[in-house]
Image (cartoon, coloured by chain):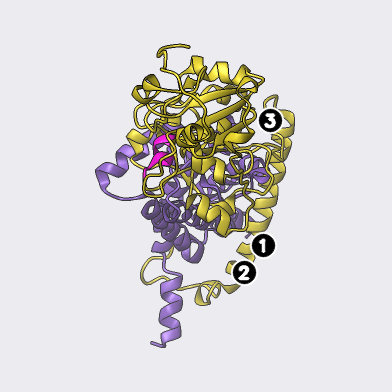
Amino acid sequence: MKRKGETMSVNERRFPFRELALSWVWALLIFLFSASVALAFNSLRSNGLPLFRRAPFDLYTDCPELSGELPVISVAKLPVGASKVVYMDARMALPHIMERIPGALFMPMYPIDLPDFSPLKTLPKGTWIVVYGSDKLSSNKRLVTALMGQTVRGVYLLEGGLGAWKAAGRPTVKTRIPMAKVADIHPGEVLFVDARDEDAALREQISGALNVPFDTTLPPEAKTLEKLKLSALQIIVYDGGESKNGSPSLALGVAADLMARGCAKVAVMEGGVIAWKAAGKTLVPGKGGDQ
Amino acid sequence: MKPESFICRFWNHWSHPVVGLHFRLVVGIVFVLAAIPKIVDPSSFAWSIALYQMLHYRHVHLLAVILPWVELVAGVFLILGFRTRGSAVVVCGMLVMFIVAIAFAIINKIEMSGCGCFSQEGAKALEAHRSEMGTSLLFRDLAMLVMTGYVWLFDTGRLGLDGVIKRLRK
């Protein structure tokens, strides 16, 4: 070190341009040396990582109650056709059936009940779960919170929901709910499902009909649902036939729910009970309970 | 006194290697301490990298294997004062990368359990420190970037192995 009064050497009277330039060369050499050591060490150690990962990460995130925010992912970050990404639709059955992301699991977030999380057990480890749903009802956020509450890892909220998905040019699937005219229905060959509330069904219903009231707060009863799934007959869903301010009919809601839950051959009876009566067909008092 | 002469005197002032030594020790020790848990458990570090969602998952492992060793070697070189300026460039590059990654995570509101800079225990300690000092990860990295930049510009490595080698050659 030079103290005050000492003379400076020739080297110290100039800018260290050469040293600064050379430092970049040395930086490159240090990096190459470190990378070589790292690769050699990794190949020799017993728990060395494969250099190129084949599966996406099952990312861990904090519990939402603790972090205050939910993990979001944009459409752009989701690779097209990725096998280890599963989409979950948190909306109710009707919007799910009308338009959804291909292969999306139906996971409706009812206000007072959690969906069935058993399909998650079949997912391969490391799968990313991407949730979309209704921003208005916050069903998407509630489902992400519920999944994380079940200690499921790798859960994301799809930024912008289905709208952003479509805006990015990604494909969707639309399913039309089949309609059946009263004249085409042969009572012995179909299984009727009454979508009206229990009181209406007790007053009068089509003979042999199962009552599955349209409900946006609870899923259908598991026992009834199982019976419908096992049925080989065509399922005809009907309601009162009255249209309320152009809102979707009860029958459409229940039919969509049954279709989303895997029931085959579901159709809605056009005109409901009104059309049934107009065709001169009879109704019987409902039995109530498990029929 | 000519301005050039003044700048040269400032640039080559005897106090720079002393200040630089302190900066080198701080940054070098931080880098070595950060590198060791990552080398011991590279898969956990790979998770941390993946959390940033900046890299395609295929390349995460490669970075998780190489980066800790670059940190370790550059950190040790900084502490020893061996190829000081070269090590400073490497550390500066890594710090810029970390700053960009943290900024990316903040801007994109990516939920993370930690920055992945240290082991889990280290992250907790850092979090406690951060809440006490009221600084953020970004400021910490920026401060280290300034220190390392100073080392690159002004530290000749005189108080380190570079100085010893230079004296031996003479």
Can residue B9 be seen from the camera position used here? yes
Residue at x-position 42% and y-position 50%: B109
Q: Secondary structure at mark 1?
A: helix
Q: Secondary structure at mark 3?
A: loop
The mark tally for this picture is: 3
Q: Position of residue A17 (x, y in %)?
A: 58, 73
Q: Secondary structure at mark 2?
A: helix
Q: Are marks 2 and 1 in contact (CB under 8 Å)?
A: yes
Q: Does the stretch in magenta take in A140? A: yes
Gap in Å between the C-alphas at discs 2 and 1? 7 Å
Residue annotated with mark 2: A21
Question: Which mark is on residue A48?
Answer: 3
- For chain A, the rendered hue is yellow
**Magenta portion: prevailing SS class:** helix
Residue annotated with mark 1: A25
Question: Left or right: B165 with respect to A40?
Answer: left
Name which residue type carries label 1: Val
Position of residue B149 relative to residue B22, above or below, is below
- For chain B, the rendered hue is purple
